[in-house]
Image (tube, grey):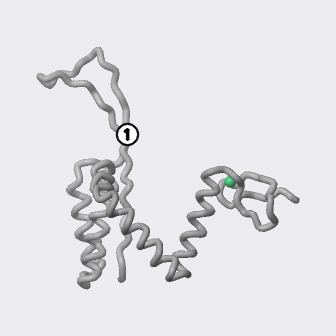
Amino acid sequence: MEKKVCEHCRCTFFPSRSNQKFCTNQTCRRSRKRQWQSKKVRTDKDYLAAQKEVHARWLEKNPDYYRNYRKRNPAYTRRNQLQQRVRNRCRRGVRSSQLREKIAKMEAKRPVVTGIYQFLAVGPDGDLIAKMDASYVQLTELQTLTICGP
Ligand SMILES: [Zn+2]
């Protein structure tokens, strides 16, 4: 059989079946499964209902999962809260131009701006500790919001 290009990683591979579109790497197999499952959920209502049932049962066994996930991922949580606020306002019929204005004001209040920052060691009296090396860190804004309507 001829070589094919994997739809996920773009590497070339020898397929074992003529309709094989993904190579055998684990990440590519997972990608294929996600693609399949995403389509299945959109097209098969019984499958969707079964998946919801499985998730509900799993959640009963792991009631703290989402609370712990939010604690471990504060950036995700903040982004989610902002998006929910946007959805709530869209539902209430707040015009998106008003919303953009409010979000812009909220953004302006933020103390952190994307960029490269230098961390310097400072002692308890506020003096710079000269013998410590400086560290650099890049802070990047991950938040993107989708605003509904005109
Ligand atoms: Zn691949």
In the image, ligand 1 is in what quadrant?
bottom right
**Of residues 67 and 47, the one drawn nearer to the viewer in this rendering:** 47
Spot occupied by residue 59 in the image (x, y as percentages of width and height): 35, 63
Q: Residue at x 33, y 25 (%)?
A: 134
Mark 1 lies within 8 Å of ligand 1 (Cβ measured): no
Residue 57 figure quarter: bottom left
Q: Which quadrant is the N terminus positioned in?
A: bottom right
Q: Is residue 78 left or right of residue 141?
A: left
Q: Give the residue furthest to the right.
A: 1
Spot occupied by residue 136 in the image (x, y as percentages of width and height): 37, 32
Q: Is residue 149 left or right of residue 2?
A: left
**Of residues 48 and 83, the one drawn nearer to the viewer in this rendering:** 48
Is 129 situated above or below 120?
above
Spot occupied by residue 32 in the image (x, y as percentages of width and height): 63, 62
Q: Residue at x 30, y 75 (%)?
A: 87
Q: Residue at x 30, y 18 (%)?
A: 132
Task: List the residue tagged with mark 1.
Answer: 116
**Of residues 90 and 116, the one drawn nearer to the viewer in this rendering:** 90
Q: Amino acid at mark 1?
A: Ile
Q: Which quadrant is the C terminus positioned in?
A: bottom left
Judging from the image, what secondary structure is the residue with disc 1 in?
A: strand
Residue 3 figure quarter: bottom right
